[in-house]
Image (cartoon, coloured by chain):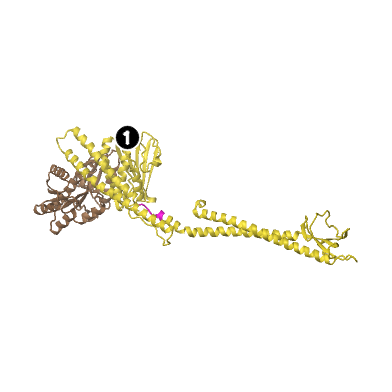
Chain colours: A yellow, B brown
Amino acid sequence: MLYKSIRFKITLAFSAVFTLISLFSGFIIYQNIKINIINSDNQELIARGQVLASKTDISPVIIPLANNDEMIRIDYINEKINKNIFTSINFPKDLKTQRPFSVIDLPDQRLALVDNPLNQDNTEKIRVFVTKPNIFLKKEISFLFYILLFSNFFSIILASLISYVLAGILLKPINNIIKTTKTITASQKMGFIEVPQTFDEIQMLSETINDMLRRIESSLNEQNNFFASASHELKTPLTILKTEIEVNLRTPSLSNEFKTFLISQLEEVSRLNRLIEDFLIVSQLNNQNLTLRFKIEPLDEIIFDVIDKVKSILKISGLKLNLELNQEIDDFEIKCDKDKLISVFINLVENAIKYASSESEIKIVINEDKNNHQFIIEIINKIDHQINNIEKLTDQFYRSDVLKNGYGLGLWISNKLINLHDSKISFTQEKGFFKVTVFQKTNI
Amino acid sequence: MKILIIEDEIKLAQFLKKGLEQAGHIADCCNNGTIGLEMAYVNNYDLIIIDLMLPGQNGYEILKNMRDFKLLTPVIILSALNSTENVIKGLDSGAFDYIKKPFDLDELLARIRLIQRKNSSESDTVLKFEGIEMNLISREVKRSEKNISLSRREFSLLEFFMNNINKIITKTQISEKVWESDFDMSSNVIEVTVYQLRKKIDKGFDTPLIHTIVNVGYIFRTEKS
């Protein structure tokens, strides 16, 4: 994701601008130096022509010696004739018209034309053509081209690197903000990001984020307080309802019909109570302020307590319960928060009861996996239909069967609570049976 | 037992009074902490059930004042404040028990029976047989002066055995009396719990006390008896 970062974009923009400027200025410099080199070469060749012309004489005819790489042609010109006095072998033919004291480029040579007047009115003169190979000039210009190209390329790379480093330094406070913000979690006591005293936009941004975090913290605390006080307030009428029903159920003269009605009401009150408990746990889990109190407890007793709590709905459902404890287990002790673990297993067993085929059996099996220091608790029930999206069962508010009672929180809570015990929960289905397996660590 | 209920929810207090009276107790109600403390001091109650959030004095203040007045009546706190901190604070303030609202009336009556037992003589609260001493209040178990640690179900099972010495006990009876539920007969819960209890009670001692009667159940006795 580097190419999406602001640092990369700054580097890219800076490098693009620098490349354009650098190439443009490099081109101008190249052109200027190139012209200067050619001009200097022209002057040198014209000067050489003048030297040769000055050394030339007509009567008697004196021809100066050309250098090895030079070729010369010497003409005598007056008003009547244009006579060639000397021409080097291989001197180019078919010359184009050329002004005196100028240089023209031939395919491999440079050619200068110099006139040397022999009298004052310029009617009689010696005309010298001198050539020299242009390879040295070409090499010099080519060298100039490559050195400028290389230095441009090198400076662009260097500028990109420097801009990348500088962008990194400039953006460091923002990266620090991102890093700190990532570690801040929604809880009662939220962390805040460090405000750099730079008196710039970064400081403003940090202060603005901290203001926002303070507002979130305050709203979370309000929400949490609401859950705590709402749950407390709701428990009082629930207690009154429950006690009233329980006291009435003890009346000896109660008709069977009314008794059934009261038992059903009692069930609903218990369900409402568990719902309130669940909402409280959800808010605590979401705010990460759920405190578990770990103590050494016997796992078999926990399961017995769970069975005790679900026995009335088990009776109504008409299902059988089969509990199998492995006889080889010496010690059922585990380190856990007993209340939380009981609520997890109540939830799992209630689910098994809710989704089991009618007149079937719920089976709870406890085995020990000594090598991994854990108990394996399996809750198995027969099912009429395959459960779709089994992996989504622990999602918050997910309901596999919308026609059944429930609000899609139970398994999510159970999974979270089991994870807080450093343990795992898994769901499988095979040949018409649904199985929940809890891998409960013996020690945390 | 003569019980005082200090609870500001009048309806709850009335139903609780009715429930306690159905169970054979005598109950008075009061919906203010300060008045409740006065009533506790003036009348001689066997037990006081208090809520924590009360007008006048709150539950903790009542407990503190009771202890300052050297009033040692056992107290059960009945509160909707469910956090462990509140439970610890309540028990540390001198309450005998802390029951969270909403509560099961059966559970409350069972806790009251425990207090009743505590007030009884030792002959009613300590069971003895063949070197086993079982204190139903402190829940301590010893055999030949050696302390034995039992889980809640194992304790209930041993208590059931100790109350039925030399009698054949069926699995169904154990299931009903100790677990108060009827498991599917293919469950091995009873066998495993009896096995665990045997390891603690009989292992390492000369005389085994728990004997299996195949296809029937168990009997608790010495071989010679």
Question: Residue B21 location, x and y as percent?
Answer: 12, 43
Between A115 and B187, which is closer to the camera in this rendering?
Answer: A115
Between A272 and A387, which is closer to the camera in this rendering?
Answer: A272
Where is A91 relative to B165, above or below? below
Q: Is residue A181 magenta?
A: yes
- Looking at the rendering, the stretch of residues picked out in magenta corresponds to A180-186
Quick check: A435 left or right of A28?
A: left
Between A398 and B109, which is closer to the camera in this rendering?
Answer: A398
Q: Amino acid at mark 1?
A: Ser
Residue A171 in view: yes
Circle 1 Cα neighbour tier, 10 Å, few/some/many (<14 / 14–19 / ≥20): some
Q: Residue at x 21, y 49 (%)?
A: B79
Question: Residue A382 location, x and y as percent?
Answer: 35, 36
Where is B133 relative to A119, above or below? above
Q: Residue at x 60, y 58 (%)?
A: A22
Quick check: A338 left or right of B16?
A: right
Quick check: B113 left or right of A135?
A: left
Question: Residue A223 location, x and y as percent?
Answer: 30, 49
